[in-house]
Image (cartoon, grey):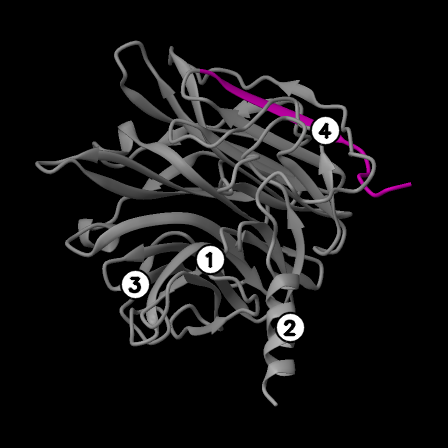
Amino acid sequence: MRRPLAVLGLLVVLLAACRPAGRAEPAPEAIRPAWQPVTLPLPPGLSGRLALRDAAACGGRWFVVGAVVDAAGMTRPAAWSSADAATWTALRPVPRSPYGEENVLTAAGCRDGRLAAVGGKSGGVHGNPRISTWRQVADGSLVEVPAEFEVFGGADAVNAGRIAGGPRGWLISGNRATGAAAWVSPDGSDFRLVSAVPGLATDATGRPWAADGTATASGWLMVGSVLSSARTGSAAVVWTSADGSAWRRAVLPGGGVAEDLQRVVRAGDRTVAVGRRGDGLGAWVGEGDAWRPGGCLGGAGTAAPGPVWGLAARGDGVWAVVAGSAAGAGWFSGDGVRWSRVALPVSVPAGSDRTVAVTAAGDVALLLVDDGGQAQVWSARGSWRPT
């Protein structure tokens, strides 16, 4: 009597899982944007190469962050702003600590046309990363907000990751030895660590990992995975919070034995998240508190899917960049379910020495690629919806 139910359950798992990277079935015609190279000016008074790490857009402003690396390998924080994603101006960084003077800005967030960033520089006896946050002030400069070492570091430190802005302020998603963690601030002038609390902490159900976060209409949302203590593999999870202090964790429907969420973005009334699903990469779509598996994406063309480099919302949908070739790494979807390939100007394979970031606003998309030796930025304009 149980056999039909077991077969039905297996069918659901097979439908929910994604194929190995590079074997997803794309739309018949790839989207081919007219990518244009973008030139970022060298900040005044500095010499060296640009090391670019992240990009953000909101409120009619575009931002890119990173550092300038001189011939001796010394770094200086750097950030740029633009009103049209074509002509850029270097922002003036204002460090407030010795480590801030050498920060590499690794994550960018945007709120009401203002930038906030996370930066770091290894130092001290043990070479631990010294993390600072940065906030753009009224005169346009980017000012370091030094923090006590234990806020982002200390014995429980693992990582402070991406930063997101929203109506309630700012959220940094990351992890501690106790499990997932969040840092919240109403204005970016001071971040409060939230960790070792129910929902975020490791518990009997497994060890969580937070990878990204975004603002929602009702508060904050983080995405990631939980490594189960009762079975092999990991499950994709989301965390929701109204105030950043109390968090509720929910495992998403999927069915694979290897699932995670690596990037999330709000797109109109939907939330779209992308990550590993089964042997490939796939999306989940959230509407309110309800989530369902979306469509599958390609990847690096190997049996193991590469990382999701970036995910951003455009006026006509969402676009993602995953590890892969110029022809197979870009993807676009109007609803998170059906995905079309987007031809990129360069390949973006997986690699620890590589940084790839994306952002978008309206009908403009921005792509940033740094291979450890050269950094490049491209923009593309126009609708991506099929005609």
Residue type at tag 1: Ala
Of the numbered discs 3 and 4, the one sitting upstream in the chain is: 3
Residue type at tag 4: Ala
Q: Percent x, y for residue 226?
A: 39, 64
Residue under label 1: 258
Of the numbered discs 1 and 3, the one sitting upstream in the chain is: 3
Quadrant containing the C terminus in the rendered view: top right
Is label 3 or label 4 in front? 3
Residue under label 3: 179
Residue type at tag 3: Gly
Residue displayed at 38% across by 12% down: 48
The dot on residue 380 is 4
Q: Percent x, y for residue 332?
A: 71, 43
Q: Quadrant of residue 75?
A: top left
Whether residue 285 appears in this view of the structure is no
Label 4 sits on a secondary structure element that is strand
Observer-nearest residue: 250 or 10? 10
Residue under label 2: 288
| Spatial CA span between label 1 and label 4 | 34 Å
